[in-house]
Image (cartoon, rainbow, N blue to C red):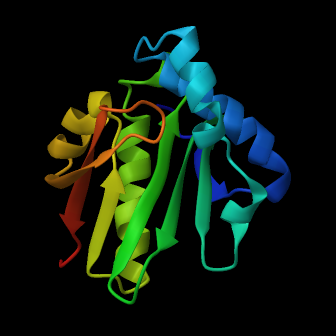
């Protein structure tokens, strides 16, 4: 990683770019075309994710977006890490950890006690390495019978 990395607030006009980045990132896990077609609606980054209380940030290097994250407050004590996606060619190089650390720092600064997320099963080990623990699971909206881990990270310093 270079010193030209920057995390900045995403712009509404970048929503289509973030959708395509999300789909490319999902492809990293080897999902077939049928699954990705079925998941497309769930993966679409809609402009409503730029509501005033939502927090959407991109990680860029030399003006190129490398990944992004989004945080959505759910109640007075919990915030959801709704998105954390990295361009596939940059997965495994520390960019995800950088966005994770940024998300945790921001959630703490905003005064939340816990951060939770629903992970892709393939990404669960990454979140476990960051200290998140599985607390339950949800049924996938894309495929019946597919379970998605729900994970929690306590933000107390």
Q: Residue at x 65, y 57 (%)?
A: 8
Q: Report the front residue among 141 and 121.
A: 141
Query: For residue 43, which quarter of the picture?
Result: top right
Q: Residue at x 34, y 50 (%)?
A: 118
Whole-percent x and y of residue 51? 70, 73
Q: Residue at x 35, y 36 (%)?
A: 120
Q: Report the front residue among 147 and 15.
A: 147
Which quarter of the rendering shows the C terminus? Answer: bottom left
Tell me: residue 156, above or below residue 120: below
Whole-percent x and y of residue 54? 60, 71
Residue 4 seen in the current view? no
Whole-percent x and y of residue 38? 58, 26
Tell me: residue 34, above or below residue 80: above
Q: How many marks?
A: 0
Q: Which residue is farthest front?
A: 144
Residue 58 seen in the current view? yes
Tell me: residue 34, above or below residue 5: above
Q: Which residue is farthest right?
A: 13
Q: Is residue 67 left or right of residue 134?
A: right
Whole-percent x and y of residue 72? 51, 69
Q: Residue at x 86, y 51 (%)?
A: 13
Q: Report the front residue among 127 and 92.
A: 127
Q: Report the front residue among 43 and 126.
A: 43
Q: Is residue 42 left or right of residue 12?
A: left
Query: For residue 139, which quarter of the picture?
Result: top left
């Amino acid at each position: 990683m270079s010193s030209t990395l920057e995390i900045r607030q995403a712009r509404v006009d970048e929503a289509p770019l973030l959708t395509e980045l999300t789909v490319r990132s999902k492809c990293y896990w080897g999902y077939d075309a049928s699954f990705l077609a079925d998941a497309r609606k769930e993966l679409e980054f809609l402009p409503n994710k730029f509501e005033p209380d939502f927090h959407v940030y991109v990680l860029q290097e030399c003006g190129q977006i490398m990944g992004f994250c989004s945080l959505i407050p759910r109640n007075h004590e919990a915030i959801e890490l709704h998105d954390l996606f990295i361009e596939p060619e940059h997965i495994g190089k520390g960019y995800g950890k950088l966005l994770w650390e940024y998300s945790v720092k921001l959630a703490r600064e905003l005064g939340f006690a816990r951060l939770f997320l629903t992970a892709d099963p393939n990404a669960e080990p990454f979140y476990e390495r960051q200290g998140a623990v599985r607390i339950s699971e949800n049924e996938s909206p894309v495929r019946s019978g597919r379970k998605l881990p729900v994970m929690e990270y306590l933000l107390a310093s």
